[in-house]
Image (cartoon, grey):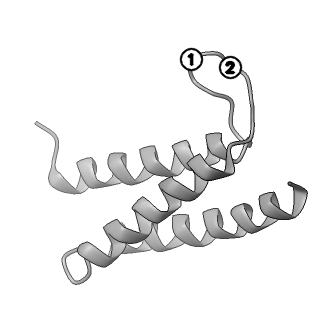
Amino acid sequence: MEQPSSLFSILTLSLGNAALVGLGLVPEPDTGATSRNLELAEQNIELLAMLKEKTKGNLSSDEEHLLNGLLYDLRLKYVEGQKKA
C-alpha cells in the first residue's frame, strides 16, 4: 500500500489536473480534446482550497509546498481564463 504522503500528492495532483482540463490547458483524458469549462475548473480549485484548510497543521513541508504552489498557479490561470471568456 502507498504511503499517506504519496496518496495525498496523488489526490492533490489529480484535482489540479482536473482544474487544468477545465481551463482548457490540458486535453481531456478520454477524448484528447480540449475545451474550457471554467465552472469545473473553479470547483476543483475550491476543492483544493478546502483540502488546504482542512489539513492545516497536518501536512509535511513537501505536501504543503505542493498544495500551495498548485493553488497559486491554478488561481492565476483561472483569472487569465476568465479574461479570455
The residue sitting at 53% across, 43% down in the picture is: 18
Q: Kindly tell me whether residue 60 is visible in this rendering.
A: no
Q: Secondary structure at mark 2?
A: loop
- Residue 11 location (% of width, % of height): 34, 48
12 up-or-down from 28: above or below: below
- Residue 13 location (% of width, % of height): 45, 49
Location of residue 83 by image quarter? bottom right
Near-viewer residue (46 or 1): 46
In this rendering, the count of numbered labels is 2
Q: Amino acid at mark 1?
A: Asp
- Residue 64 location (% of width, % of height): 36, 74
Question: Crowding at label 2, few (<14), some or many (≥20) Cα neighbours within 10 Å?
Answer: few
Farthest right residue in view: 84
Q: Amino acid at mark 2?
A: Gly
Discs 1, 2 touching: Cβ within 8 Å: yes
Location of residue 25 by image quarter? top right
- Position of 17 with respect to 35 (left or right) is left
Farthest top residue in view: 31
The residue sitting at 52% across, 61% down in the picture is: 45
- Position of 17 with respect to 12 (left or right) is right
- Cα distance, mark 1 to mark 2? 6 Å
- Position of 35 with respect to 64 (left or right) is right
Q: Quadrant of the C terminus?
A: bottom right
Mark seen at residue 32: 2
The residue sitting at 34% across, 53% down in the picture is: 9
38 up-or-down from 77: above or below: above
Q: Quadrant of the N terminus?
A: top left
- The residue wearing badge 1 is 30
The residue sitting at 79% across, 62% down in the picture is: 82
